[in-house]
């Protein structure tokens, strides 16, 4: 059985506190250092102060579109514009709406490097993070 190389770097997880613990275990198991926040504003402050290598955020936090707002704020901020952003959500399960970053229309308003629907297998999440960090 092949064990992947540990991933070097820091990931900022912005999510509800119960989900942060689960994601922390997944990312730390992959070798990443994890910092966390539970709101977009707190996440932006932490990102500016801690300079993470990647941000993983839930879409529906304090508002239903909080993660999309985070994407706009990050990509407009020169200090954060190049930090990869992964958005996670169960929007489809809750609303039936499909968000696909392969669509040119979605790319115009979803300012993220990846969008993954929950539930997501931990190995798939780690693989996406690994691929985005290797592109940096």
Image: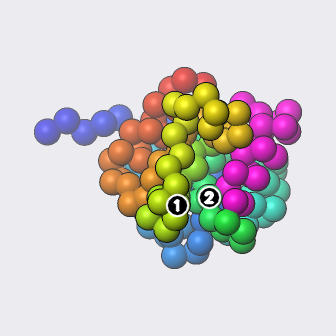
Instruction: Examine the structure image and report whether residue 29 is included in the region drawn in magenta.
Output: no
| Mark 2 → mark 1, Cα distance in angstroms | 8 Å
Q: Residue at x 44, y 38 (%)?
A: 128
On the image, the x and y values in percent for residue 89 come to: 52, 58
Residue 84 visible to the viewer: no
Q: Residue at x 52, y 64 (%)?
A: 95
On the image, the x and y values in percent for residue 134 come to: 51, 26
Could you tell me if the residues under marks 2 and 1 are in contact, i.e. CB atoms within 8 Å?
yes
Rate crowding at label 2 as few (under 14), some (14 to 19) or many (20 or more) other CA atoms within 10 Å: many
Of 95 and 19, which appears nearest the observer? 95
Instruction: Examine the structure image and report whether residue 79 is included in the region drawn in magenta.
Output: yes
Residue 96 visible to the viewer: yes
On the image, the x and y values in percent for residue 117 come to: 45, 53
Write down the residue under mark 2: 59
Quadrant location, the N terminus: top left
Write down the residue under mark 1: 91
Of 112 and 37, which appears nearest the observer? 112
Q: How is the image coloured?
A: rainbow
Q: Which residues are magenta?
A: 65-83
Rate crowding at label 1 as few (under 14), some (14 to 19) or many (20 or more) other CA atoms within 10 Å: some
């Amino acid at each position: 059985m092949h064990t992947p190389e540990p991933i070097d770097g820091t990931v900022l997880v912005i999510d509800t506190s119960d989900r942060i613990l689960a994601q922390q275990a997944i990312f730390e198991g992959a070798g990443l250092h994890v910092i966390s926040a539970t709101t977009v504003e707190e996440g932006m402050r932490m990102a500016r102060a801690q300079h993470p290598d990647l941000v993983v955020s839930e879409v529906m936090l304090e508002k239903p579109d909080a993660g999309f707002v985070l994407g706009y704020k990050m990509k407009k901020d020169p200090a954060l514009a190049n930090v990869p952003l992964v958005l996670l959500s169960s929007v489809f399960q809750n609303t039936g709406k499909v968000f696909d970053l392969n669509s040119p229309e979605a790319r115009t308003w979803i300012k993220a490097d990846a969008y993954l629907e929950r539930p997501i297998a931990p190995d798939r999440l780690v693989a996406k993070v690994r691929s985005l960090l290797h592109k940096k």
